[in-house]
Amino acid sequence: SFEKLNEGGTIVATAVLLETRATLANTLKDQCKEIVSIAVSRSQPVGNSRLMKSENNIDIFVYEKGASL
């Protein structure tokens, strides 16, 4: 758990569901160092061509335990 994390330690969590994103966005707000969203696409054949089809974004939440905790 975050309480057991050493000072300066980092926890990284990922989310693809809206509910998980909302939970992480409201968790440890003061310790959230960064949020990164990655968009992923995969190619699919369409006739004689290929189309890039979007997949779910992946959100990465980075929390860091500071000296004041």
Image: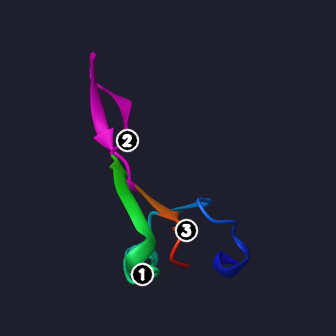
User: Label 3 vs label 1: CA separation?
Assistant: 24 Å
Q: Is residue 36 left or right of residue 61?
A: left
State the residue in front, 33 or 18. Answer: 33
* Numbered badge on residue 19: 1
Please give the residue where the numbered disc 2 appears in the rendered image.
40
**Residue 12 point in image, percent of width and height:** 56, 59
**Chain part drawn in magenta:** 39-58
- CB atoms of marks 1 and 2 within 8 Å: no
Which is more N-terminal, label 3 or label 2?
Answer: 2
Which quadrant of the figure contains the N terminus? bottom right
Residue located 33% across and 45% down the image: 39
Please give the residue where the numbered disc 3 appears in the rendered image.
65
Q: Amino acid at mark 1?
A: Glu
* Numbered badge on residue 60: none
Question: Is 56 part of what is drawn in magenta?
Answer: yes
> Quarter of the image holding residue 49?
top left
**Residue 68 point in image, percent of width and height:** 51, 76
Q: Amino acid at mark 3?
A: Lys
Image depth: mark 3 or mark 1 in front: 3
Which quadrant of the figure contains the C terminus? bottom right
Question: Is 49 part of what is drawn in magenta?
Answer: yes
User: Label 1 vs label 2: CA separation?
Assistant: 20 Å
Image depth: mark 2 or mark 3 in front: 3
